[in-house]
Amino acid sequence: MKKIIIDKNLCMNCLNCSLACMSKNNPHSNNIYDLDLSDESNESMNHIALNSIKSPTPLFCRHCEDPECVKTCISGALTKNKETGYVEYDPSKCASCYMCVLYCEYGILKPSESKNKGKKILKCDMCKDREMPECVKHCPTGAIRYEEVENEVKKA
C-alpha cells in the first residue's frame, strides 16, 4: 500500500502542499495561482504546524491500520477501505458530531470552517482520482513523498 511519508527536516513551511490541496478540492481552480485565498471555502485537507522547537511539521491523515476515527464514527461516514488501506470519508453520512476529531490519535482531522460546506470534517482522500497526491507533486524540497510501505505493526 502506498502512503504519504514526511521528512519534517526538509520542510521549509512554504505551504505549497496546502495550496495544492486547496486547488485540487476547489472546482473553480485549475492551479494554485487561480486560488482566491480570501475565499473561506478554500480549505486544505492537510496543514503545517510548528512542533515543540518551532520547526514546521506537515500533518496529514495517516490512514491508520486500526483507526480510532472509524471506530468512533457513529454515522458510518468514516470507513476503512480494505483494498486500498485508506480511511475514506462520506460527507453525506456525517452527523457532524466530531467524535472522529476528538479521537484521532494524531490530531489530524479538523472541522471545516467554511459556512458553504456545512458542518463537515476535512480529511485527506489521498487524491484517489489521481496517480499521485497533489501535496507530494508540489513539494519543492521532497519533504513529502508517496511510497509503498508494508502494513503497520501494532505497538503493544
Image: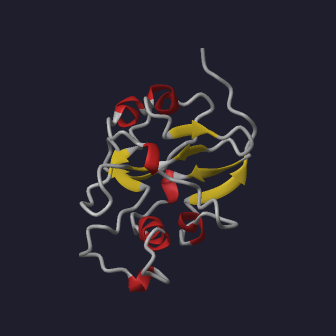
Q: Give coordinates of residue 44: x percent, y percent.
A: 40, 61
Residue placed at 70% from the left, 66% from the top?
131
Instruction: Indicate left or right for 7 with 19 as reference.
Output: right
Q: Give coordinates of residue 79: x percent, y percent.
A: 57, 37
Judge whether 91 appears above or below 151 on screen.
below
Residue at far top of view: 156
Q: Give coordinates of residue 142: x percent, y percent.
A: 59, 64
Name the image quarter holding residue 83: top right
Task: Give the camera-side residue of 70 and 22.
Answer: 70
Instruction: Indicate left or right for 64 with 92 as reference.
Output: right
Name the image quarter holding residue 86: top right
Residue placed at 48% from the left, 40% from the top?
77
Instruction: Indicate left or right for 107 with 38 as reference.
Output: right
Judge whether 64 appears above or below 155 on screen.
below
Task: Give the camera-side residue of 53 and 136.
Answer: 136
Residue at far front of view: 92
Task: Give the camera-side residue of 108 and 88.
Answer: 88
Instruction: Report the quarter where the C terminus lies.
Output: top right
Please name the colour scheme applied to the rendered image: secondary structure
Q: How many marks?
A: 0
Residue placed at 42% from the left, 68% from the top?
22
Q: Give coordinates of residue 109: x percent, y percent.
A: 40, 44
